[in-house]
Amino acid sequence: MKVLLTGAAGQLGQALIASKPAEVELIATSRAGGNRMIALDLADKDACYAAVMEKQPDWVINSGAYTAVDRAESEPELAYAVNAAAPEAFAQAQLQNGGRLLQLSTDFVFDGSKGSPYHPDHTASPLGVYGASKAAGETAAQSALNTAQLCILRTSWVYGPMGYNFVRTMLRLHHQRALDGQPLRVVADQVGCPTATTGLAKACWQVVEQGECGIHHWCDAGVASWYDFAVAIGELGVAAGLLAKAAETRPINTCDYPTAAIRPMYSLLDCSFTRSVLRLTPLHWRTALAGVIQQISGQGSLT
Ligand SMILES: NC(=O)c1ccc[n+]([C@@H]2O[C@H](COP(=O)([O-])OP(=O)(O)OC[C@H]3O[C@@H](n4cnc5c(N)ncnc54)[C@H](OP(=O)(O)O)[C@@H]3O)[C@@H](O)[C@H]2O)c1
């Protein structure tokens, strides 16, 4: 089976490469190329279409995305080009080829006002440019491609042992603030679920192997606020020997930490349908986090 992967240098892209099933012939693409990846700029929809027409993959896994949630507010054209026009081009090309598209998407397509976990068929109502551009990507792909050729997989609060993410940032901040004797203030009134790239990559490959289509939700198990997540990162960082001491962590409200983009206050996804059809049981987020922190510990440095 031939799979074209975008965003191969990103957090999920790296986990997908590391866990690739033996029978998959992987064509990995990234913005810059190199390191056994082909250069593909997701902001160039013609290049996206042409890459699929040339390589004729059975699946495109579109893991690449414009993921800078706050910066997207001032760069909407680029966010829409990457997050909406590229998936549309992949969908149009796969319609011609007869192949399938796995489009990664986000909990930020929802506004967080529901107060209970979002089911896959709940209507999108994004708050910011990033969420709106990802929702536009879902809609564009759905308009271009038959339902039997498209899987949309939404996830939340993604982190892994590499790349720019909350876990690595918090480990650095715990280290610095504990040294300086300063507290770490973290938002406690936004609730969701942290998701490690290892389990997410497994779910993606299961989608491909089963030929699963439709809209799916995959996250690790449990629920957390950013504050809960930060406290756990400190505790597990100490347990793994990465931190001598965790900083004192204080809960704050969203209004005390203004950001360019408004984020959903509650973005838990109901993953029960997907867990059942993929026959996968996610780890609780704290267990998954312990595994990732062990991996970071093996890298020997927080930078
Ligand atoms: N991160 C999260 O918390 C989160 C939450 C929910 C859903 N998701 C979704 O999950 C998927 C994987 O996310 P991730 O955490 O792995 O993101 P990531 O680490 O930010 O990786 C995204 C990749 O996309 C690439 N990219 C951005 N613009 C590009 C362009 N114009 N041309 C080519 N490549 C480009 C980036 O390359 P550069 O490094 O060169 O910029 C990066 O390697 C995405 O679809 C994202 O929307 C993520």
Image (tube, rainbow, N blue to C red):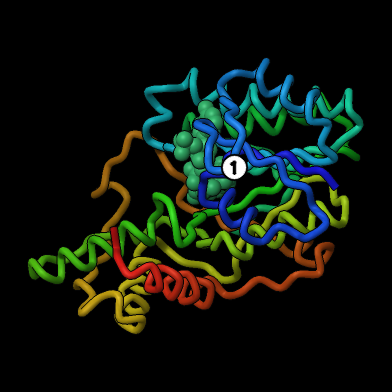
Mark 1 lies on residue: 36
Image x and y of residue 238, in percent: 29, 80
For the C terminus, the quadrant is: bottom left
Which residue appears at 85% of the width and 40% of the height? 58
Residue 58, above or below 32: below
Residue type at mark 1?
Arg
Say which of 67 and 189 sits in front. 67
Check the image and report above or below for 43 versus 277.
above
**Residue most toward the bottom?**
239
Identify which residue is drawn at 69% across, 62% down.
202
Q: Residue furthest left?
A: 180
The image quarter containing residue 214 is top right
Residue in view at x 77 percent, y 43 percent: 3
| Mark 1 surroundings: few (<14), some (14-19) or many (≥20) residues within 10 A | few
Indicate the position of residue 100 as horizontal and vertical percent values: 84, 38
The x, y position of residue 108, in whole percent, is 54, 43
Q: Can you tell which quarter of the image residue 279 is in?
A: bottom right
